[in-house]
């Protein structure tokens, strides 16, 4: 499958992997938008958030728990952080393998651009 994040999972494309377990992989974003910018992906290929079903609910919950744990480890839990799933073009999704952005280490703006 021609999917960038599946290639990172397969080890065919290098990435700065900071955490992995049976279900997810976490790496540094190649173009960070904040001092902390991690990408949390499921090892299973799912193209967009529109494709998740009840079956994926534990996986999505696990991704958020991993984000929380990393935020604690990187000392941004108290200062704050943002978690984002971009879905399709209006949200600016560029890689069609679902991923959770974990952003922190600076003040975020609201509403987002
Ligand atoms: P999206 O816009 O789809 O929500 O986010 C895709 C993210 O993946 C972007 O923040 C982009 O910088 C990041 N990204 C794209 N290609 C690569 C890559 O080859 N390696 C890494 N580590 N991040 C990437
Ligand atoms: Zn994929």
Image (spheres, helix red, strand yellow):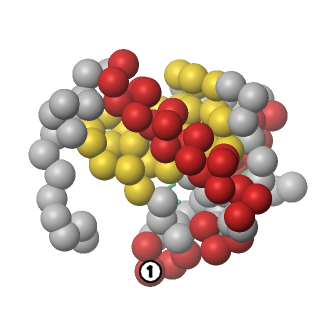
> Could you classify mark 1 by the number of other residues whose Cα lies within 10 Å: few (under 14), some (14-19), or many (20 or more)?
few
Q: Nearer the viewer, residue 69 or 95?
A: 69
Q: Nearer the viewer, residue 4 or 80?
A: 80
Q: Which residue does the image show at 44% across and 80% down from the upper left? A: 90
Left or right for 103, reference 60: left
Q: Is mark 1 within 8 Å of ligand 1?
A: no
Q: Residue 34: horizontal and vertical position, in percent?
A: 27, 41
Tell me if residue 25 can be seen.
Answer: yes
Task: Name the quadrant of the N terminus.
Answer: bottom right
Say which residue label 1 marks.
90
Asked if 4 appears above or below 75 in the picture, the reply is below
Q: Residue 9 falls in which quadrant of the image?
A: top right
Q: Residue furthest bottom?
A: 90
Asked if 51 appears above or below 29 in the picture, the reply is below
Tell me if residue 34 can be seen.
Answer: no
Q: Which residue does the image show at 16% across and 40% down from the upper left? A: 106
Q: Residue 110: horizontal and vertical position, in percent?
A: 16, 64
Q: Which residue does the image show at 51% across and 78% down from the upper left? A: 89
């Amino acid at each position: 499958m021609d999917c960038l994040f599946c290639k990172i999972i397969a080890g065919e494309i290098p990435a700065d992997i900071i955490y992995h377990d049976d279900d997810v992989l976490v790496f540094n974003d190649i173009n960070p938008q904040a001092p902390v910018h991690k990408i949390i992906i499921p090892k299973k290929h799912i193209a967009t958030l529109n494709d998740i079903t009840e079956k994926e609910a534990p996986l999505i919950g696990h991704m958020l728990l991993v984000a929380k744990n990393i935020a604690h480890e990187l000392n941004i839990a108290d200062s704050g952080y943002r978690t984002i799933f971009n879905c399709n073009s209006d949200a600016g999704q560029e890689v069609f393998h679902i991923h959770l952005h974990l952003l922190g280490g600076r003040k975020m703006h609201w509403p987002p651009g």
